Amino acid sequence: MDNILYIFYPITGLLMIALGIGLGIFLTRRFNLGWRLWWIGGVTFILSQVGHIPFNLGITALFQNGYLPAPPKSAQLYVNAIFLGVSSGIWEEFARYFMYRWWAKDARSWKKALLAGAGHGGSEAIILGALVLLTFFQMLAYRSVDISTMVPAEQLASAQANIQAYWTAPWYQVLLGAIERVFALCLHLANSVIVLQVFTRRQFRWVWLAVAWHAIFNAVAVVANSTLGPYITEGLIGIGALISVLIIFTLRNEENLDIIESSPEPIKPLELHQVDEVQEDLESSRYHSL
C-alpha cells in the first residue's frame, strides 16, 4: 500500500496547488480580467494569517497557563471548534473588507469579487499543497533513518505511530485533501461576494454575515472530524460548499454593475430652442435639457 502512497501524496499536493492556480486562470480568461485582483486576494490571505496565527497561539497559551479558565472536558471540543471558527472568520473576513476598502477600490462587481476570492482561497490551497509535498519528503527521509536519534525518548512512541499512520493511510483518504480544497474555494468565493455587498449595498452587516458563515463552515469541520471521521466530515463540508455556490449565484448582480463600470450612460444631446437673445431668457434656458 505504501508504494501507492508514493504516488498519491505528491499527486494530492500538486492537485491542491493546481486548483489554486487553475481557478485563477479560468476566471481571468472567462471574464477577460488581469491577474491583479487575484494577487491582491492572495496577499490579503497571507496578511490575515500574520495576525490570525499568533492570535490563536496566544489564546492557546493563555488557556494552557491558567490565565483563562479551561472549559469542562465534555465541552472542550465544541469550545475549541467555535473559537477556531470565529477566529478564522474575523481575521479573514475583516482582511477581505479592508482589501475592498483600501486596496481593491475598483473591485465593485461580481466578477471581480470572484477573482479576488479565487486569489484568497487559491493562495491558501497553494500553501497547503506545498506543505503536503514538504511533509511527504520529510516522511521519506524518516523511513531511512533511526528516528530514536532525532526525537526525545518521551515522544518516540508518538512519532513512530504518526509515521506508521502516514504510510498506512488508504490512498483515497489521501486525496481528501485536494477535495477539501475544492470545497474551501467555494467558501472563499462566496464570502468574497458577501463582503462586496458592504460596498454595493452600503450595509456593514454583510461583513458579519461572512464571518458567521466562515465560522459555521470551519466549526462544523472541526467537530465532525473529531466525532464522525474524515468521510462524513468531507460530506458535510461538501454540503457547505453547495450552499456557498448558491450564495454566489444568488448575489450575482454583475450585469448591472458592469454597465455602471464600463458603459456610462451617454449624455443626451441638447435640444435647441429658439429664444430671444435676451440675457434673462438665456439664463432660464441653460439647463433646459436636464
Image (cartoon, grey):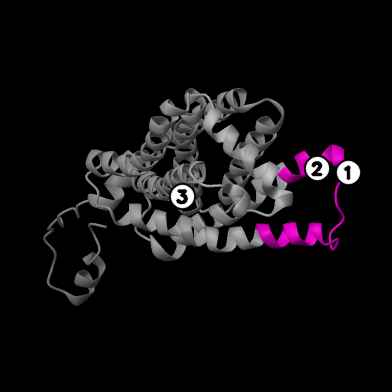
Label 2, label 3: how far apart the Cα atoms are = 35 Å
Please name the residue shown 84% across and 63% down the image: 67
Q: Most prominent secondary structure in the magenta stretch? A: helix
Q: Is residue 27 above or below residue 201?
A: above
Disc 2 secondary structure class: helix
Image marks 1 and 2: residues in contact by CB distance under 8 Å: yes
Q: Nearer the viewer, residue 18 or 118?
A: 18
Q: Point out the tag, 3 or 1, that comes first from the N-terminus.
A: 1
Q: Which residue is mark 1?
A: 72
Q: Quadrant of residue 75?
A: top right
Q: Within 10 Å of the Cα at label 2, are there few (<14), some (14-19), or many (20+) other Cα atoms? A: few
Q: Point out the tag, 2 or 3, that comes first from the N-terminus.
A: 2
Please name the residue shown 56% across and 27% down the image: 234
Residue 211: image x %, image y %?
A: 60, 47
Disc 3 secondary structure class: helix
Disc 1 secondary structure class: loop
Q: Amino acid at mark 2?
A: Gln
Q: Quadrant of residue 78?
A: top right
Q: Which residue is mark 3?
A: 196
Q: Which residue is mark 2?
A: 76
| Residue stretch in magenta | 56-80
